[in-house]
Image (spheres, rainbow, N blue to C red):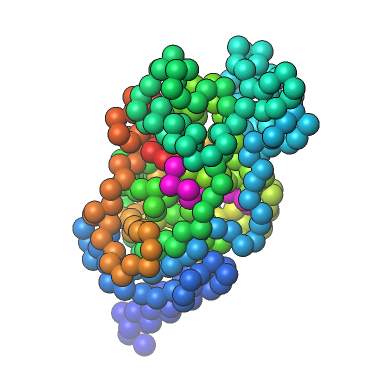
């Protein structure tokens, strides 16, 4: 066989295999309809075939919550402390630790301060995105509280490049155009991956916004999303594909398939080895899921939509939304350069 022909055959066989994998890897319960392919425009303006994945956005493979404990007798979710960087269960012991710093997280009868409804949650959005001071928030906002909101199911269409392109230059989160609709990508159970929480903006008001035992909580758009991957929270060692980034590359669990710790990860937590192709690994340290993108991005929209034009993605990645002054700070805990707290919650 002429070398060129055999190369072409090998390439198409590879493409066919990866196509099947992407479709097969999604949890059928998450899909509103079968995954299809359409022609779309990626974030760099290039035309490409994209998978159209329509999901329900809430997990069917695990329960959500708890986030805030109702009283000091209860256990809430998990929060990475901004002072000692340890992951704490939000319970009486941790809330008392916060109070030793001059916070005021509960009543004398043990009732924990928490956001009760959408109205309260909206105040949090206003103060965090509007650049309020703690004193401003003391008057008309939410302070000294555990932030939580019940999620609502949403139909979301996410477009993933079918043949991800590895570019020479990485795109850090700060420069990337993603939105709360798209997140950074999607878990195989239909839940969106989000960038690291903007913890400095949250704790500026003596608030915390815990994640549940699977690494998720609810954002300003009522969407349930992950800041940490369930495979990290569950200490999974299968190295399996747990989702896809918005550039179409696979996101794997915290280990390699043989259980070993991933080596030589690049600045955005990806690498290419052993015939697996370029892939990201989730971890229990910043950036938790991924720190940027290897290739041009697809996009996402609310509802069941048929047009993929990622050049119109409204998100501004790391700019913090609506001029929130906290948005220009670096990542919590001094992560790699280029990763900042993004919009959303
Ligand atoms: Zn790997
Ligand atoms: Zn969040």
Q: Does residue 6 belong to the magenta stretch?
A: no
Q: Residue 219: horizontal and vertical position, in percent?
A: 48, 43
**Residue drawn where x is 28% and y is 67% of the image:** 307
> Which residue is most to the left?
45
Which sits in the foreground, 194 or 16?
194
Q: Which residues are magenta?
A: 220-231
Which residue appears at 66% of the width and 57% of the height? 62
Between 127 and 14, the one nearer to me in the picture = 127
- Outermost residue, bottom side: 1
Q: Position of residue 113 (x, y in %)?
A: 62, 27
Residue 125 occupies quadrant: top left
Residue 287 in view (yes/no): no
Residue nearest the viewer, comparing 291 with 146: 146
Asked if residue 204 lies left or right of residue 312, the reply is right
Which of these two is toward me, 134 or 226? 134
- Can you give x and y, in whole percent of width and height, for residue 324 in the image? 34, 28
């Amino acid at each position: 066989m002429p070398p060129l022909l055999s190369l072409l055959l090998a390439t198409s066989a590879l493409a066919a295999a990866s196509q099947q994998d992407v479709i097969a890897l999604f949890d059928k319960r998450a899909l509103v309809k079968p995954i299809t392919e359409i022609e779309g425009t990626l974030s760099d303006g290039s035309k490409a075939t994209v998978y159209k994945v329509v999901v329900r956005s809430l997990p069917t493979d695990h329960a959500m919550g708890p986030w805030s404990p109702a009283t000091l007798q209860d256990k809430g979710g998990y929060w990475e402390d901004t002072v000692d960087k340890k992951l704490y269960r939000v319970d009486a012991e941790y809330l008392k630790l916060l109070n030793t710093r001059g916070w005021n997280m509960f009543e004398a009868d043990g009732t924990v301060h928490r956001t009760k409804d959408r109205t309260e949650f909206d105040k949090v959005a206003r103060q965090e995105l509007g650049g309020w001071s703690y004193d401003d928030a003391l008057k008309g906002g939410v302070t000294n509280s555990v932030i939580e909101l019940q999620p609502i199911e949403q139909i979301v269409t996410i477009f993933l490049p079918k043949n991800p392109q590895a570019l020479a230059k990485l795109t850090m989160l700060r420069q990337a155009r993603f939105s709360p609709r798209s997140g950074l990508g999607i878990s195989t159970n239909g839940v969106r991956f989000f960038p690291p929480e903007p913890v400095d903006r949250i704790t500026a008001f003596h608030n915390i916004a815990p994640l549940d035992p699977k690494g998720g909580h609810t954002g300003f758009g009522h969407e349930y999303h992950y800041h940490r991957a369930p495979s990290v929270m569950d200490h999974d060692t299968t190295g399996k594909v747990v989702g896809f980034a918005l550039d179409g590359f696979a996101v794997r669990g915290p280990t390699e398939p043989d259980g070993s710790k991933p080596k030589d990860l690049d600045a955005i937590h990806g690498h290419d080895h052993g015939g697996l192709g370029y892939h990201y690994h989730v971890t229990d340290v910043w950036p938790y899921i991924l720190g940027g993108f290897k290739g041009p991005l697809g996009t996402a929209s609310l509802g069941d939509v048929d047009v993929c034009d990622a050049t119109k993605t409204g998100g501004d990645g790391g700019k913090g939304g609506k001029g929130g002054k906290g948005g220009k700070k670096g990542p919590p805990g001094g992560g790699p350069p280029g990763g900042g707290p993004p919009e959303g919650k």
